[in-house]
Image (cartoon, grey):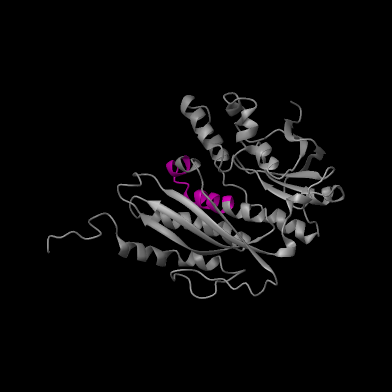
Amino acid sequence: MSGKLTYQQAGVDTRKAAAIVGDIKSHVKRTQKERKLWGAYGLFAACYDLSAYRAPVIMTGCDGVGTKVELLLEREMYETAGKDLVAMNVNDILTTGGDPLMFLDYIGIPALDENKIVRLIAGMADYLEDCGCILAGGETAEMPGIVPEGVVELSGFCIGCAEKEDLIDPTTVAVGDVLVGYASDSIHANGWSLVRRVLHDHPGLASEEEMQHWLRPTRLYHDVVRGLRAIGVRPRAYAHITGGGLPENLERLFQGLGADLTIPRWELPGVEKLYEHIDSTDRFHTLNMGVGWVAIVAAEDAEKACAAGPGGFVMGTMRSGDGVHVTVAGE
C-alpha cells in the first residue's frame, strides 16, 4: 500500500456504483415496451427518435417528492417514493397534452445502498411502465459529508412531446365551461411540511394505519388523459393539483375568469383529525382536498369526461370575475 488515499476511502465507491447500474437494467428494460430509446441505454446521454411526429413540440418538467420523503424513508417505503417522483413529473407533462417519453432521476445519498436504490428505481419503473415512459437514465450521487446519514435526495426530470395541433390551450377556457375533478389517492406529495408540523406538535394524532393511507403514492393521471382521447373529448385545460391546492393551481389557467366549486367530503381515513389543527381556509390552499386532477371541458362533454377515469365528478362551471371559491358539500 502506498499510504495514499483512494476515492473509496474518501467515501465514494465507483465500482459498487457500476455494479448497481447492472442490477437495475431489468427495471429499465420494462419501461421500454411501448417506446424505445434511439441507441443503447447507459451511454453519456439518451436519444429518442421523434420522426413519428409530424410537427413535434417538446415539453419538459422537473419536480421532487418534497418533505414527504422523510416519512417514507422512516418506513422504508422506497417504492412509494419512486412512484411519487414519477407521478409529480409525468402528471405535469400530461397537462400540456403531451406524451411522456423519457424520465431521468437524480438520487443523492451519503453512501451507496443497493437495497434503497434498487427499490427506488423499481417504484419508478412501476409507474413508468404503466404510462409508457422510458427510464432513460439519471444520476446516483454518493455525497459523503454533504447528504446526511439516513437522508436521500430525490429529483425527477421528464421530457414529453406532442403534435403542435394537439397541444392543450388554456386560453380557450370560456364562461360556461365545466370543471371535472378526479379523485386523489392520498395527500400525494405536497403539503407535507404542514402535515409534518401537525404530527410533530401532536404526537400520536394519526394511527399507523391512517398514516399508510396518507402516504399512498401520488396518483398517475395518464388513464384520465387516455380515456378522454379515446372518446374524442379535447379539454380546454388540465390542472395537476399540487402545492397551492385547487385555488392556486386553477387560477393560473384563468384569464379574467373564475369558478365556484363544490367538492365531496374527503374520505381519507383520519383526515378530519388533521383538519382540527389546520386553519380552515389554509387547508384549501395546501392540500388537494381529495381532488388531484381537473379537466376543463365544454359543457356538452362534461358527462363523458366524468366517465373517462375513476373518481370523475362535476365540480362547477366557469363564470366571469376573478377567483376560485371552493366549498365542501354538506359543510
94, above or below 164, in the image: above
Residue depicted at 75% across the width and 64% down the height: 165
Q: Residue furthest front?
A: 256
Residue 225: x %, y % from top left: 71, 56
Residue at 37 percent across and 44 percent down: it is 150
Report the residue at 76% width, 27% height from top: 330
162 horizontally vs 320: left or right? left
Above or below, comparing residue 270 to residue 84 in the picture = above
Residue 160 part of the magenta-drawn span = no
Question: Which image quarter: residue 234?
Answer: bottom right
Question: Along the horizontal axis of the image, is 284 left or right of 46?
Answer: right
Magenta-colored span: 71-88
Quarter placement of the N terminus: bottom left
Q: Position of residue 60 (x, y in %)?
A: 58, 58
Q: Is residue 276 visible?
A: yes
Residue 264 in sight: no
> Residue 230's spot in the image, x, y percent?
77, 61
Q: Is residue 73 left or right of residue 326?
A: left
x then y, percent, for residue 95: 67, 53
Q: Residue furthest left?
A: 2
Name the foreground residue: 78 vs 96: 96
Query: Which quadrant: the C terminus?
Result: top right
Residue under the image location 61 percent in, 42 percent down: 242
Q: What is the total number of numbered labels drawn onto the structure image?
A: 0
Q: Is residue 137 above or below residue 206?
A: below
State the predominant SS element of the stretch in magenta: helix
